[in-house]
Image (spheres, rainbow, N blue to C red):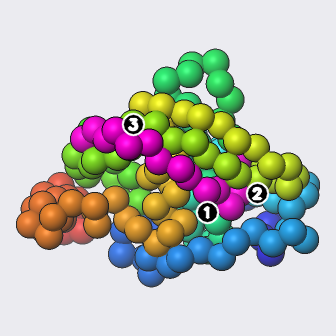
Amino acid sequence: MIARKNVADKLSIRYWDDPVLSTLCDAVEDNEFGPQLDEFGQEMIATMEANNGVGLAASQVGIAKRIFTMHFPEQEKAKPIIVCNPILKLGTETIRATEGCLSMPEVFLQIERAVSVVMQYSNPMGEQVEISINGMDARVAQHEADHIDGIFFINRVSRQMRRAALRDWWDKIKPRYA
């Protein structure tokens, strides 16, 4: 499934126009759970933290599998988790708040999300877990679940807002390519 040379290998983040980011990711199969998957998840956590992120989906590092890692911004002492094959049950109350994405640095958009989520998932060893999360923690889970469903956060705003965001982003990064 996910063959890596060693834990010291760095994972490369894919950017907004990479086709893998619009791919509906495949489920992690029963025979893929275990130490190798946990090692990959730990690499994802290290990559997420090295880039000051609060979440990272496997598709963002080029692997089209239903895996993501996330921090709990509202729970300082909580350790990041590795989430496989998640199912999210969204609460009915929603709120619009600012989101960014490691695959599109320097772009921040107002995205409407559920305030609360019940998330069922498997950990890398295949054990079933269910957690209830709220606020920013719920937002992170929804953002990363979107990634593994092939939905990029700029697709959650109007076409006009998306064009404006891309134009502004290009204006910010264009000098790097001059």
Return the disc, 1 or 2, that comes first in the chain's sequence.
2
The C terminus: image quadrant: bottom left
Residue 15 in the image, given as x and y percentages of width and height: 41, 67
- Do the CB atoms of the residues marked 3 and 2 lie less than 8 Å apart? no
Disc 1: which residue:
58
Q: Nearer the viewer, residue 115 or 79?
A: 115
The N terminus: image quadrant: bottom right
Q: Nearer the viewer, residue 92 or 77?
A: 92
Residue ID at (49%, 24%): 74
Q: Which mark is residue 115?
A: 3
Return the disc, 3 or 1, that comes first in the chain's sequence.
1
Residue 138 appears left or right of 115: right
Say what secondary structure mark 3 lies in: loop
- Tell me if residue 41 comes above or below residue 94 in the rendering: below
Residue ID at (28%, 61%): 156
Q: Looking at numbered disc 3 in the image, what kind of residue is underneath it? A: Val
Mark 1 Cα-neighbour bin, 10 Å: few <14, some 14–19, many ≥20: many
Please check the rendered image and state whether residue 85 is part of the magenta-colored stretch, yes or no. yes
Residue 102 in the image, given as x and y percentages of width and height: 43, 53
Residue 125 in the image, given as x and y percentages of width and height: 87, 52
Residue ID at (15%, 64%): 158
Q: Residue furthest top?
A: 77
Q: Looking at numbered disc 1 in the image, what kind of residue is underneath it? A: Ala
